[in-house]
Image (cartoon, rainbow, N blue to C red):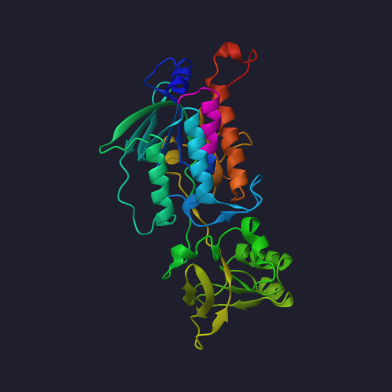
Amino acid sequence: MKQNAECSDAHSSDPGVVDCAVIGSGPAGLSAAVNLARWRRRVLVIDDRDARSLWGQISRNYLGFPAGAPAAQIRLLGREQAANYGARFLAGQVTFATSDIGRFQLLVSPCPPRPAEAAGREGNAAADLERAAALGEERISEPVEIFARTLVIASGVRDQFPRFSGWQQCVGVSLFWCILCDGYETIGERVGVIGDDEEAIETALDLLEFTHDVFVVAGNPRGFDVSGARLADLSREGIRAYPCAVAQYRNRDGRISALVLDDPAHTVVPTKLVFAYRRPIARTEVARMLGVDLNVIGQIIVDSEAHTNIAAVYAAGDVTDLHDHQISAAVHEGNAAAAAANYYLYRPVQRAPGAIAR
């Protein structure tokens, strides 16, 4: 570790400034950290452990894990891999960010006590905290200033799952958000979709590729926010639509067994799996402080190489508009962000004449 850190110092003109501060230690952030550290850059990963990668889901379509791998385990392995190449870690929240003459100034505050509504299972967060401590993650008791030549924002999203007794144990086990990740596991099962908009309707219809036993619940007393023609599409495909809220999610040990509808009959609809669709909220607090452009739904706008509109600021993973909510996509985007940041960090002589780093 010491030798790797010394190699990284050789590439920085100011030992008090890290080459790249990576905000977030999910798959995108850790992928960026691994690759930048392998390019002998001084990398600091800042994380508050409020991430969807700490839920209970198992990634079964990530290449190289034929039996599937828990997302939280991939995160642990990624952290160890980044540490092996000299990346450092800091537990905290970035509460202020600004640009300061060719570098960025961040104020990192201590993480507050973990709230009950924080993303991820408490056990996964505790294991992540323990492993990070063993790898030298720094804990702070008061705010500290960090200076960085580049930034990679990989802060992820806040999911808006339905809240019910036992919901946290269900996430990633019987309560999902991504048909691309988990549609295969619905083969032959009864599946419910919660949502009132077009995305929910499309998801229900797309699930017919795996099972013919699908139903949709609006999830609110107002009913569906789609045209009658779309509801007719569901009916023609054999999908029952319930224009009401859910009164109860019957579950045990993370397994949902039925939904009790908030209708006059208190209809009980058995199910094994539920896909909940309510748009996640991108965690863009740092991006907003720096003036990074966002799209209409609040995600960071990036190009295919992870550039934002601000020079030396890159973004990757679910916080951006170029993602499909999969670990494989997040790892790729983190790698792209690292490559862009590394190119920016090259000395002018290392670039082709006239090439612009941004």
Residue 241 left/right relative to 155: right
Q: Is residue 344 above or below residue 247?
A: above
Residue 277 image point, x, y percent: 55, 63
Question: Number of numbered discs present?
Answer: 0
Q: Is residue 255 above or below residue 23?
A: below
The quarter of the rendered structure image containing the N terminus is top left
The answer to whether residue 29 of the structure is visible from this angle is: no
Residue at the spot 57% in from the left edge and 55% down from the top edge: 58
- Residue found at the far bottom of this picture: 265
The quarter of the rendered structure image containing the C terminus is top right
The answer to whether residue 332 of the structure is visible from this angle is: yes
Q: Is residue 331 above or below residue 61?
A: above
Residue 269 image point, x, y percent: 57, 80
Residue 260 image point, x, y percent: 50, 80
Residue 44 left/right relative to 32: left
Provide the major secondary structure of the magenta segment.
Answer: helix
Residue 305 left/right relative to 249: right
Residue 349 image point, x, y percent: 58, 11
Q: Nearer the viewer, residue 25 or 81?
A: 81
Please provide the residue range marked out in magenta: 29-42
Q: Is residue 174 above or below residue 88?
A: below
Q: Nearer the viewer, residue 334 or 72?
A: 72
Q: Nearer the viewer, residue 64 or 101?
A: 64
